[in-house]
Image: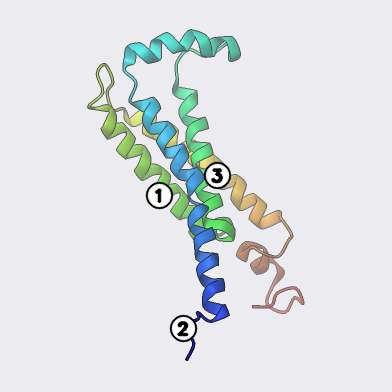
Amino acid sequence: MSSRIPRSSRRQSRSSRVRRWRFVPALVCMAVIFVLSSRTGGQLDSWLPLFRDFLPGLQSFDPVHYAAYFVLALTVAFALGRHAFTWRGVLWIIVICVLYGASDEWHQAYVPNRTPDLKDLWHDTIGAAAACLILLLIGYFGGNGSSRLYKSRQGRNHPGNLE
C-alpha cells in the first residue's frame, strides 16, 4: 500500500495554493491604506505640497480615496479570478471594499488629528464601483467567452456556449 497522494489531489492542492497567493496583492494594498491612514493630520498636511508637485490642482487628499479604492477593487478582482467579471463577483468586490473602507474610517477615530468621515467612505465606494464598472464592461464586451455575462449575451444555443 502506497502512501502517495493521488495526482488529482496534488493538482487540487497546488491550485488552491495558487488561489491563496492571488489574495496577496489585495492584502498588500490594504496594508498600505492602513499605514497611510495611521498618519496624523499634521503628517498628511506636510505631504500635501509634495503631491501638488505631481498633481498641481490637488487641494486635499479626497481624490486619493478614489484611486486607492479603485486599486484595491482591482486587486480583489485579481484574487477572485474569472469570477470577478460576474455580477456576483462585482458585488463581493464592492462589499469587501466598503467594509474595509468603513473599518479604515473607524480606525481613523483613534489617530490623532484625524476623524472618521462618511464623505471619505463615499469616495472609497465610488472608486471601487468605478473599477467594478470596468470589470463588468470587460466581462460583457471582452468576447473571450469566459464571462457569464458574455455567455448570457450569446444565448443558450450558441456553439461557443458549452454550459
Classed neighbour count for the residue bearing mark 2: other residues with Cα under 10 Å, few (<14), some (14–19), many (≥20) = few
Q: Which residue is mark 2?
A: 3
Q: Which residue is mark 3?
A: 74
Q: Amino acid at mark 3?
A: Leu
- Residue at image position (56%, 12%) is 57
Residue 138: percent from left, percent from top: 66, 51
Residue 26: percent from left, percent from top: 48, 44
Q: Amino acid at mark 2?
A: Ser
Query: Compared to 93, does 46 lie above or below?
Result: above
Q: CA distance from mark 1 to mark 3?
A: 13 Å
Classed neighbour count for the residue bearing mark 3: other residues with Cα under 10 Å, few (<14), some (14–19), many (≥20) = many
- Residue at image position (50%, 61%) is 17
* Residue placed most toward the observer, 119 or 3: 3
Query: Compared to 130, does 90 lie above or below?
Result: below
Indicate the colouring scheme: rainbow
Q: CA distance from mark 2 to mark 1?
A: 43 Å
Residue 121: percent from left, percent from top: 37, 34
Q: Which residue is mark 1?
A: 95
Q: Secondary structure at mark 1?
A: helix
**Circles 1 and 3: CB atoms closer than 8 Å:** no
Residue 75: percent from left, percent from top: 53, 45
Q: CA distance from mark 3 to mark 2?
A: 42 Å
- Residue at image position (53%, 38%) is 71
Q: Earlier in the sequence, mark 2 or mark 1?
A: 2
Name the image quarter holding the C terminus.
bottom right
Nearer to us: label 2 or label 1: 2
Query: Compared to 71, does 17 lie above or below?
Result: below
Q: Amino acid at mark 1?
A: Val
Q: Earlier in the sequence, mark 1 or mark 3?
A: 3
Q: Secondary structure at mark 2?
A: loop
* Residue placed most toward the observer, 31 or 114: 31
